[in-house]
Image (spheres, rainbow, N blue to C red):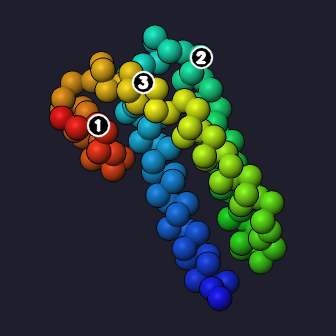
Amino acid sequence: MVGASSLRQRWSAFESCLTWHLEAEERYVLPLVERTHAVEIQEARRAHARIRKLVSEVALELELNIAGECSTHELMSMLREHARRNMPALYTRADEVASSTVRYCVGAMLGLAMLDA
C-alpha cells in the first residue's frame, strides 16, 4: 500500500505534468486554430478550467488526508472526455496550419509523436 507522503509526492508530479501540458496546449496549440474554430477552442479552455479545479480539489483532499474516490474519478472522467472529444481534431487542424518547426517543437514539448516535422 502506498503511504500518504508517497501518494502526495506522486500526485504532485502528476499535477505538475498535467498543468504543464494544459499550459503548453493553451499557449502553442489552441492559438493555431482559434480564429477558425472559436467554439471548439472555447470549449477546450472551459474544459481546462474544470480540469484545473478538479486537480486543486484532489490536491486539497490529499493534503487533508480526506481523498475520496469521487473527486479522482470525476477528474479521470473529465480528462478522458476532454481527450476523446475535441483534442484529436484540434491537434489535426493545428498540425495542418503549423510550420514544420512549430510542429516539431510543440510535439516535443507535449511528447506527441503525431506532431512530427
Q: Which residue is mark 3?
A: 31
Residue under the point 47% across and 18% down = 34
**Horizontal arrangement in the rendering, residue 87 relative to residue 3 (left or right):** left
Residue 64 occupies quadrant? bottom right
* SS class, disc 2: helix
- Amino acid type, label 2: Val
**Dot 3 or dot 2, earlier in sequence:** 3
* Residue 35: % across, % down: 46, 12
Label 1 Cα crowd, 10 Å radius (few <14 / some 14-19 / many 20+): many
- Determine the residue positioned at 54% across, 23% down: 41
Q: Kindly identify which numbered label has been placed on residue 115.
A: 1
Q: Position of residue 92 (x, y in %)?
A: 38, 26
- Callouts 3 and 1 close, C-beta under 8 Å: no
Dot in front, 1 or 2: 1
Q: CA distance from mark 3 to mark 2?
A: 13 Å
Residue at which label 2 appears: 39
Look at the picture and state if 80 lies above or below 16. Answer: above
Position of the C terminus, as image quadrant, is top left
Q: CA distance from mark 3 to mark 1?
A: 16 Å
Q: Which is closer to the viewer, label 3 or label 2?
A: 2
**Which residue is found at the position 80% from the left and 68% from the top?**
68
Badge 3 amino acid: Pro
Q: Is residue 71 left or right of residue 20?
A: right
Q: CA distance from mark 1 to mark 2?
A: 23 Å
Q: Which residue is the extreme one toward the top?
A: 36
